[in-house]
């Protein structure tokens, strides 16, 4: 049900706003953000919707993209504080507490990556990204092990990114997309990621509004399931189709705010709930 | 920039700490009383102490609850305030256990018991009037007769039976002499008193002899009887099917049965459960809406095919009404099976 991979990818996508193109050497983009999800439903392994105890996640993170050279960017996503919690479970009949509120705080899974500009000028720009998912979070946490802040595996996501600008009725828009393959370890299934994003700037380029669609599809080649993991399994064979919207506004020459919302349209083994995020970004 | 920045960071703090919500679990179940001594027959001359349990509106067993017992057919079975049922004659009787809930409602459970005879006649279709009779005469010119009218071939242990005799003297006059002598060949099996009342003690065989000495004759009659220890006919297992109550796969038949060492929950070959759930557990419960008062059997480690769980002897066959499959970490009901109605 809980899918740290899904969560982190949502955050990662959110963090990429304004970072869609290769940064020049010595320049960069960073964002300090908070991301929140509260779910009392989830998609089952058959894509059906079932209730669950209300669980929440709040992640405060730092995203950084920095131009190491003309064509190479360093990327880091640092979920410095992950708060995984569950509501208290109270009897509606007599008010007795069945389960007290539970909270686990910890570091999340860190992503480190390098992006290489394959084609940095022209109508279409192309780049490739290799992101390493480090198991810095806790894969077993809380009273029953389910308050995890990471999936405990080292994964490598390789992406081919494409972006282009175009105009409709005099309004400039952009489109960017990527196709990625996430190689997961420790028995988790590998995943294919498909991502589309389009947006446009308003108010003399001080306001950005965008929409995105992110499809994650497992290859079902993992061996991990409850029958071979002592009855416990998290975040394997996750499937999701997530739509999201975001707006970012420049409040200074080098900084601004952004807020975003995402909603899973369909999925398997993920929460069914909107996630909300907000952050402060800096260009330097 | 700095005041705005601090303001924004401050705005994030309430979000970060907003995790103090509550899930209210809809755990109401109708209060119920359950007769847990599931017998179907009683033997005349015996008695049994019935037991019943009361479960409140969240399925908790309230042990201190006062339970009233009634018989709807007191001419067949009498029952006292403690729940001890005593059969009086053959037939069927419905017994009731009832109590009053905390809300003032009366809840009851019933049990239908068939009372069977404690003796077996040689030929059930005929009224025995002359069995195992060996009338003896010595030096008599007429034929006085001594017979046992209702001889039997079998009697249940710990029950009693009254033998009746027929006596006709040498003048052809019927009477009931006071000088009859009743004896048993094995008093550890059957005891008999001076009135011809048998008391079956333990399993085995014994010959009951009744004799009468007249002025010139010694008459006697005998009845060869086997004493058996009837097993109380009780329910020893329940079977049914698991049914998914979620979007996850859960199916298959189950049997909950009494074994020599306790209870055993067996799942059949057709059992199948989803392997994608984190922390799937199996429980016994009296509330199918929560596992809070349930007995946790343990984590599910077999997801297809037959297997079983051995349960401690402290758990009775009727202590729980449901088998629950539950995703423990996320408090998700996966499926259930009703053990009995």
Image (tube, rainbow, N blue to C red):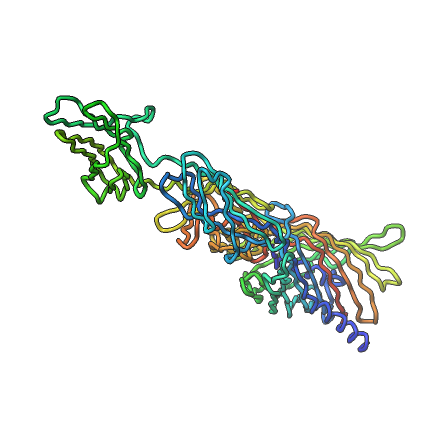
Q: Which residue is drawn at 37% across and 39% down?
A: B43
Identity of the residue furthest to the left in this view:
B139
Locate residue B116 relative to residue A101 in the image: left or right.
Answer: left
In the picture, residue A64 is in which quadrant?
bottom right
Q: In which quarter of the image is residue A79?
A: bottom right
Q: Report the residue at 32% width, 24% height from top.
A: B126
- Tell me the quarter of the picture where residue B119 sits: top left
Quadrant location, the N terminus of chain A = bottom right
Question: Where A270 sits versus A30, above or below?
Answer: above
Image position, residue A171 (x, y; %): 87, 54
Nearer to us in this view, B253 or B258: B258
The reply to whether residue A249 is in sight is yes
Residue B317 percent coordinates (x, y): 44, 48
What number of labels is visible? Answer: 0
Q: In which quarter of the image is the C terminus of chain A?
A: bottom right
Task: Name the residue at 79% across, 74% down.
Answer: B7
Horizontal and vertical percent position of residue A119: 72, 57
Nearer to us in this view, B317 or A183: B317
Residue A69 seen by the camera: no
Q: Position of residue B107 (x, y in %)?
A: 57, 47
Q: Please state if B207 lies on the left or on the right of A146 as rendered.
A: left
- Is B186 positioned to the left or the right of B111 in the image? left
């Amino acid at each position: 049900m809980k899918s740290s991979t899904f969560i982190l990818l949502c955050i990662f996508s959110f963090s990429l706003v304004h970072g869609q193109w290769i940064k020049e050497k010595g320049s960069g983009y960073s964002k300090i953000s908070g991301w929140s999800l509260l779910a009392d439903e989830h998609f089952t392994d058959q894509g059906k919707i079932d209730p669950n105890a209300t669980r929440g996640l709040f992640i405060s993170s730092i995203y950084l993209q920095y131009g190491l050279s003309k064509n190479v960017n360093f990327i880091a996503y640092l979920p410095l504080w992950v708060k995984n919690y569950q509501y208290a479970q109270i009897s509606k009949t007599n008010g007795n507490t069945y389960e007290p509120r539970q909270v686990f705080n910890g570091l999340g899974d860190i992503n480190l990556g390098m992006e290489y500009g394959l084609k940095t000028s022209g109508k279409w720009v192309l780049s490739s990204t290799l992101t390493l998912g480090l198991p810095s979070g806790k894969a077993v946490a809380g009273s029953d092990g389910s308050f995890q802040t990471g999936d405990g595996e080292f994964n490598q996501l390789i992406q081919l990114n494409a972006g282009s600008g175009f105009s409709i009725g005099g309004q400039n828009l952009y489109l960017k997309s990527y196709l990625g393959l996430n190689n997961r370890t420790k028995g988790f299934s590998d995943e294919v990621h498909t991502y589309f994003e389009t947006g446009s700037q308003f108010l003399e380029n001080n306001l950005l509004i965008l929409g995105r669609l992110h499809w994650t599809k497992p290859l079902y080649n993992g061996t991990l399931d409850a029958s071979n993991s002592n009855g416990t399994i998290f975040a394997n064979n996750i499937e999701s189709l997530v739509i999201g919207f975001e707006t970012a506004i420049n409040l200074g020459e080098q900084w601004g705010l952004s807020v975003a919302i995402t909603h899973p349209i369909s999925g398997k083994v993920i929460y069914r709930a909107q996630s909300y995020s907000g952050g402060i970004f800096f260009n330097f | 920039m700095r005041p705005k920045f601090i303001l924004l960071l401050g705005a994030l703090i309430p979000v970060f700490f907003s995790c103090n919500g509550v899930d209210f679990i809809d755990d109401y179940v109708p209060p119920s009383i359950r007769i847990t001594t599931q017998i179907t027959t009683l033997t005349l001359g015996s008695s049994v102490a019935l037991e019943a349990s009361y479960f409140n509106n969240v399925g908790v067993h309230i042990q201190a609850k006062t339970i009233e017992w009634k018989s709807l057919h007191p001419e067949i079975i009498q029952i006292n305030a403690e729940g001890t049922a005593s059969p009086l004659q053959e037939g069927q009787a419905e017994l009731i256990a009832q109590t009053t809930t905390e809300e003032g409602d009366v809840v009851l459970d019933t049990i239908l018991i068939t009372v069977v005879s404690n003796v077996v006649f040689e030929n059930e279709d005929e009224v025995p009037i002359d069995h195992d009779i060996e009338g003896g005469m010595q030096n008599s010119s007429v034929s006085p007769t001594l017979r046992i009218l209702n001889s039997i071939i079998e009697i249940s242990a710990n029950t009693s039976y009254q033998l009746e005799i027929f006596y006709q003297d040498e003048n052809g006059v019927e009477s009931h002499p006071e000088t009859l002598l009743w004896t048993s060949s094995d008093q550890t099996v059957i005891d008999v008193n001076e009135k011809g009342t048998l008391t079956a003690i333990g399993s085995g065989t014994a010959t009951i002899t009744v004799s009468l000495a007249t002025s010139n004759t010694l008459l006697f009659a005998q009845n060869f009887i086997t004493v058996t220890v009837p097993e109380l006919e009780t329910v020893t297992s329940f079977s049914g099917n698991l049914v998914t109550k979620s979007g996850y796969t859960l199916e298959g038949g189950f049997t909950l049965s009494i074994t020599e060492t306790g209870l055993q929950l067996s799942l059949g070959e057709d059992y199948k459960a989803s392997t994608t759930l984190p922390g799937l557990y199996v429980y016994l419960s009296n509330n199918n809406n929560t596992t809070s008062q349930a007995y946790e059997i343990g984590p599910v480690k077999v997801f297809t095919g037959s297997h079983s769980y051995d349960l401690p002897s402290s758990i009775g066959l009727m202590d729980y009404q449901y088998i629950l499959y539950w995703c423990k970490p996320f408090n998700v009901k996966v499926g259930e099976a009703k053990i009995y109605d």
